[in-house]
Image: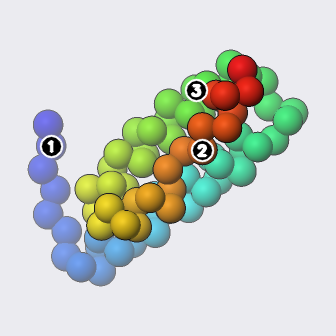
Amino acid sequence: MLGLLLNQKEAQEVEYMLKREMEEILLDLSDPRIDELVKRAMEEKYQIVFSIYKRLVTPKESVNYLLPRTRKKMQ
């Protein structure tokens, strides 16, 4: 376990970087050219990034970045 102290500006910057990373992963997950095995690895990475993001924002804000379950239902 690690601890990290951030001032408000640093926390906002980390939040921004995490949002960008999650948006990029979501975009790649919707790309039909990417192999399913790669997509599963990307989903695992998304869950890790999302769990970090949840620690910085309110629950209301984190709902916007929940991983859509539509892909899992189609399989």
Above or below, comparing residue 25 to residue 69 in the picture? below
Q: CA distance from mark 3 to mark 1?
A: 24 Å
**What residue sits 46% from the left and 69% below the top?**
16
Q: Is residue 14 visible?
A: no
Q: CA distance from mark 3 to mark 2?
A: 15 Å
Provide the residue designation for mark 2.
68
**What residue sits 33% from the left and 55% below the top?**
54
**What residue sits 40% from the left and 39% below the top?**
48
| Disc 2: CA contacts within 10 A as few (<14), some (14-19) or many (>=20) | few
Decide which of tag 3 and tag 1 comes sooner along the chain: 1
Q: Nearer the viewer, residue 64 or 54?
A: 64
Provide the residue designation for mark 3.
41
Q: CA distance from mark 1 to mark 2?
A: 29 Å
Above or below, comparing residue 47 to residue 41 in the picture? below
Q: Are marks 3 and 2 in contact (CB under 8 Å)?
A: no
Q: Secondary structure at mark 3?
A: helix
Q: Is residue 29 visible?
A: yes
Q: Nearer the viewer, residue 49 or 13?
A: 49
Q: Secondary structure at mark 2?
A: loop
**What residue sits 44% from the left and 58% below the top?**
63
The image's colour scheme reads: rainbow
Residue 6, given in percent of the width and then of the height, sits at 19, 68
Q: Quadrant of residue 37?
A: top right
